[in-house]
Image (cartoon, rainbow, N blue to C red):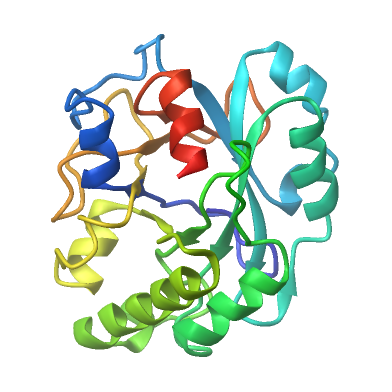
Amino acid sequence: MARDQTAPRRRARIVAASAVALAIGGTALAEVPVSAASKPRGHDVSSHQKNVNWRKAKNKGARFVYVKATEATDYRNPYFTQQYNGSRNVGLIRGAYHFAVPNKSSGRKQAAYFLRHGGRWSRDGWTLPPALDIEHNPYSSRRCSGMSKGQMIHWIKSFSNEVKRQTGRRPVIYTNAIWWNTCTGGSRAFASSHPLWLARWGASAGALPRGWSYWTFWQHDNGGRFPGDQNLFNGSMRQLKRFARG
């Protein structure tokens, strides 16, 4: 995802869940091309997109969006209200995501900050589960934020447990195969309960992070018909609504 403070724009997300993908019917393989027209299209935005013309985005075919809410425990997207509420007002299914900065504070603290500032979930059919953007840290020159594989896994579990405690749902995980396999050692501890939001720009999804067999969301491009990055949901519109309801 793009960072909203001093670092240059950068992306790498993923959110996948074997359980969710299996519920979608077992057809959501990594090789599904971007041209899969039947899958709902959406996007993700941050402060880079500022005030979004949501009616225009919907008219172009957007059906869902993830909005950046926070990062670490000291940053809030100043456009969050317009983006989050505005997308809902035109009939888009929307959710919020947090950009992780693991070397600054614990996963539990960052999850609590996120949930206080827009990251909560509601079983209203219009709210996607909270999402964790965990990828390259542009604020650190050290690989994997200077953390060991075990420390990174613990950090993600801490974040996830706090989200589950407060909302009743596990977060979607946005990441990419290279970062995940390097910084968690390809941990398989999350795939069965955390939907995958895959970050890979290209015509096909390619290899998934170890542990996941399916992607739930796929961020396939950083430009296109909608503001921000372009995404697909791995199922039908009816299944997307069911996924939102939990």
x%, y% of residue 195? 33, 49
Q: In the displayed structure, would residue 183 be above or below residue 85?
A: below
Answer with left or right where residue 182 lies relative to residue 130.
left
Instruction: Answer whether residue 57 is visible to the viewer in this image.
Output: yes
Instruction: Answer whether residue 231 is visible to the viewer in this image.
Output: no
Q: Nearer the viewer, residue 179 or 22?
A: 22
* Residue at image coords 48%, 51%: 11
Say how many tags the image has.
0
Q: Nearer the viewer, residue 179 or 131?
A: 131
Answer with left or right where residue 156 lies relative to residue 137.
left
* Residue at image coords 52%, 90%: 105
x%, y% of residue 9? 59, 54
* Residue at image coords 82%, 37%: 86
x%, y% of residue 233? 42, 29
Q: Nearer the viewer, residue 121 or 205?
A: 121
Q: In the displayed structure, would residue 206 be above or below residue 78?
A: above
Where is residue 89, by image quadrant?
top right
* Residue at image coords 41%, 51%: 13
Answer with left or right where residue 157 lies relative to residue 41.
left
x%, y% of residue 98? 57, 64
- Which image quarter holds the C terminus? top left
